[in-house]
Amino acid sequence: MPKRFLSIYFTHFAADRMARHHPELRDQPFLLSAHVRGRMVVKDFSPSLEQEGIRQGMVVADVKAIYPSIKVFPDDPAEEEKHLKALAEWSIRYTPLVASDFPDGLLLDISGCPHLWGGERPYLETITGCFQHNGYDTRAAIADTIGAAWAVAHFGQNMTIVEPDGQAQVLQSLPPAAIRLDAVTLDRLEKLGFKQVGQFSHIPRPNLRRRFGEALLNRLDQALGKAPEALEYVKPTPLYREQLPCIEPIRTAPGIGFALKRLLESLCERLAKEGKGLRSGIFICHRIDGKTVQISIGTNRASCNAEHLFKLFELKIPTLEPALGIELFELEASLVEEVSETQESLWATENTDHKAISELLDRIAGKVGMNAIHRYLPQDRYWPELSIREATTLNEKPETDWCTERLRPLHLLAHPEPVEVMVPLPDYPPVHFRYKGKLYNIVKADGPERIEQEWWIQTGPPRDYYQLEDENGARYWLFRLGLYDGESPKWFLHGYFA
Amino acid sequence: MEGVVNKQEILRQLREKLEVLEGFRPLPQERQLDFGLGPMADAFPGRCLPMGAVHEFISPSPACAAASTGFISGLLSTLMKNGSICLWVSTRRSLFPPALKSFGIEPHQVIFVDVRNEKEALWTMEQGLKCKSLSAVVAELREVSFDESRRLQLAVEESRVTGFLHRLQPRSENTLACVSRWKIRPLPSVVSDGLPGVGFPLWEVELVKIRNGRPGIWSVGWRDGAFHHTPVTEVAMSQVEKRYA
């Protein structure tokens, strides 16, 4: 089958995206600016500014001199690329082979598709109409090659359908930039007076190669269909979803459990085959009165163990209200991760079955909440509250050693408690302190250990920590906040030693 | 004479039978661990701290709680020596993980579960005690009823996981199905050669109850990553008496 390609060019992609996300901007002129060699340059602008003489690459300051009230936003190429990918995925409804042409276009391999829409003309109109309806300014063209479709979409007449084998004819009158050349080659062609592709396409190839390099010939061949060109097509993220319709509406908990088990088994079989595991899942029940009820679970580690996942869901089945009955069950894995078998050997233990522990934690998380489970790793900071950080996964190992140079209290109060102290001399440990109305006489003391604020993050007075022991042998960690300069510093109880 | 020996033998066998009926199963010799408890070992049945059981600790004040946590951490360090994982359940946790390192525990091998109420804490502890892969479960809470403690005891009989029930300022010291009841109080640290400063931690460890064992009182410290035993001096005892006078 002869190949056919459709190229869509979004003339104001960045601006259209901005207007879509901020509908209030739709009727206002605005700019998107980017840093180019230390200057703020116009990257894109709302379509209404085109008549006013604004062009891409102008300096923002110049535009502001003309329109002082114009709104300027920073350009975000990463978001734009993501958005373009999303558009490409959306376009899969028209053809299975869609590639995003960064920064502002889509390339569709439409071979064998247009007849489903009644021919190439209605097909083209449907697609562009849909984009325009959603607020995108587009130019599009269909041709036999990617190069020709791209050239006509960017430089030719909008909505052109190039006849099969007609690309050579169409390219003749287009400028050299239409065959996707780099700036250096374009500059050289311009200097030599080549204004159209037709002016150099018939020149013997060795001559062209000597002057402009292989790239020009390659691009020309690609546009004419003499050289192959590969596209990287987008792959839609697979949806892990299973459905189970019921003949009779189901109203009982055992019935729901049975349906859930069936769905989990088929989903887990699929996940296991692809080497993946479920991290979070939703079980949706469609009731016959048109409403939906759902329960969701999360796991600590990707799992494709149907029995374990069922146990997690089982805790929540009583919260489902079947009302008159449930006619359709749906199970969706909303977050899926790779399962790696090497994870089993974490913590380098001999007799620990880690799977059992992660399943235990899943059960606990299901009952008391995910945010109840904590694990801590050391952090290279001295401020006591900041010397630990929470581990995000069960498998995370400490990057640095736990610091044991300085003794730390076994019990640390969440918030230091203010105490009243008696200090014989500045920088001496207290003789006694009063906490919650009770007096503690200090017999032994160690310190001070000064811990300064992390000045690059926050400012404030330093803490001078003392280890104190009272007459009964109870050991405390007190600190003085600040120095003795003028006013008397405050004292706090921060922890208990074992 | 022979009759007397026979009688003692029969009594011993009967006692063993009773112990089994009471749910006491001593661990096989190769699985017993040496906790370095020295003279305290005489108090335990079979001269080994009962593992696969729930121990109860009562702390009437925050300072005692810190001492109890220190003693529990010392025991845990032996249990976790093979790199296994421990679950730490609490309602109002004040434990500072880096300090565990000085008691020979890798703090990242402890999983903390901070629950909202005691009911959830007990549920979590029971679930943890049923998981054979854990080395130990520590729970910090206030009130436990006899029935709840029996559930915990049944869970450990199945899985042989060691549980530590740390009760902070309980309203009453009610009877529980736990294998032992401990009270740990801090003692003034001993500084050698009259040096200034605070010495190594020292506690007065009181074993109030122990099933099939002999209760007692000892003074135990923690020094250089191991328990350190000092005879209960009269000074320390008099202090204790003074405090409870």
Image (tube, coloured by chain):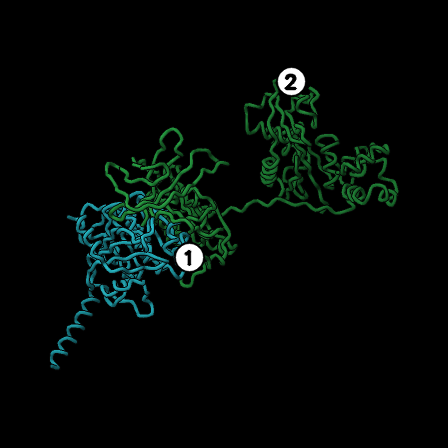
Chain colours: A green, B cyan
> For the residues marked 1 and 2, what is the alpha-carbon distance in whole angstroms?
64 Å
Circle nearer the N terminus (1, 2): 2
Residue A45 screen position, x and y as percent: 64, 26
Please determine whether, in this image, residue A174 is positioned above or below residue A306: above
Dot 2: element: loop
Dot 1: what SS?
helix
Q: Chain of mark 1?
A: A
Residue B134 in sight from this viewpoint: no
Residue that numbered label 2 is attached to: A67
Residue B230 locus on image (x, y percent): 27, 59
Q: Amino acid at mark 1?
A: Lys
Few, some or many residues within 10 Å of mark 1 (<14, 14–19, 20+): some
Closer to the camera, A383 or A70? Answer: A383
- Residue wearing tag 1: A355
Horizontal relation, residue A490 to residue A396: left or right: left
Q: On screen, A341 above or below A16?
A: below
Q: Residue A351 appears at what percent x and percent y?
A: 40, 63
Chain letter for the residue marked with disc 2 in the picture? A
Nearest the eye: A74 or A432: A432
Left or right: A81 with respect to A347?
right
The disc at residue B131 is none
